């Protein structure tokens, strides 16, 4: 699977959809719910079970990152499965604090 900036993906096991903001520095597999994601154009409906270890959910409008590869993904549609890259859970990217306006 080639992960390019702007590419859209969907989960194979839940309703989550995501957009790649920054591609990874190395090849690997983007996963949701413990299963590899599919291109959004895929006609297959979500099926199967979410791995309980990967069931933290995807939030709409939130960015998820993999520190090891620099991968950054934006949640486009919420779902029950959580994101991972090559089995490493992606972390929720925190907003940068704004400077004080005193």
Image (tube, rainbow, N blue to C red):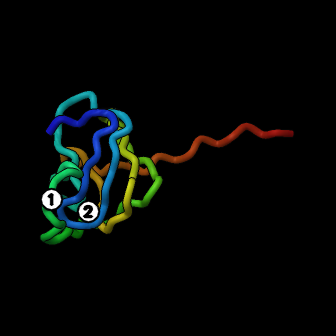
Task: Judge from the rendering whether residue 86 lies leftward or rightward of residue 15; answer left or right.
Answer: left
Looking at this view, is 85 or 15 the one in front?
Answer: 15
Q: Left or right: 94 with respect to 29?
A: right
Decide which of tag 2 and tag 1 comes sooner along the chain: 1
Q: Residue 26 location in percent, x, y?
A: 21, 29
Task: Answer whether labels 2 and 1 touch (C-beta < 8 Å).
Answer: no
Q: Report the Cα–Cα distance between label 2 and label 1.
A: 24 Å
The circle on residue 43 is 1
Q: Is residue 66 visible?
A: no
Which of the 4 quarters of the picture holds residue 24? top left
Placement of 13 over or under 31, stated as above or below: below
In the rendered image, the vertical position of residue 36 relative to residue 6, given as above or below: below
- Image quadrant containing the N terminus: top left
- Say which residue label 2 marks: 54
- Residue 51: x percent and y percent? 19, 67
Residue farthest toward the top in the current orientation of the protein: 25
Q: Residues within 10 Å of mark 1 (few under 14, many from 20)?
A: few
Q: Secondary structure at mark 1?
A: loop
The image quadrant of residue 13 is bottom left
What crowding class fits label 2: few (fewer than 14 Cα within 10 Å), some (14-19), or many (20 or more)? some
Q: Residue at x 38, y 63 (%)?
A: 78
Q: What is the quadrant of the C terminus in the image?
A: top right
Look at the picture and state if 83 lies above or below 68.
Answer: below
SS at badge 2: helix
For residue 3, which numbered disc appears in the image? none
Nearest the eye: 41 or 30? 41
Do we see residue 43 in this rendering? yes
């Amino acid at each position: 699977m080639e992960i390019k900036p702007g590419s859209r993906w969907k989960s194979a096991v839940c309703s989550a959809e995501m957009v790649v903001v920054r591609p990874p520095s190395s090849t690997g597999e983007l996963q949701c719910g413990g299963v590899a994601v599919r291109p959004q154009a895929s006609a297959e409906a979500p099926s199967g079970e979410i791995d309980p270890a990967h069931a933290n959910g995807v939030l709409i409008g939130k960015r998820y990152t993999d520190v090891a590869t620099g991968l950054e993904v934006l949640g486009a549609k919420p779902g029950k499965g959580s994101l991972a890259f090559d089995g490493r859970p992606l972390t929720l990217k925190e907003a940068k604090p704004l400077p004080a306006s005193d």
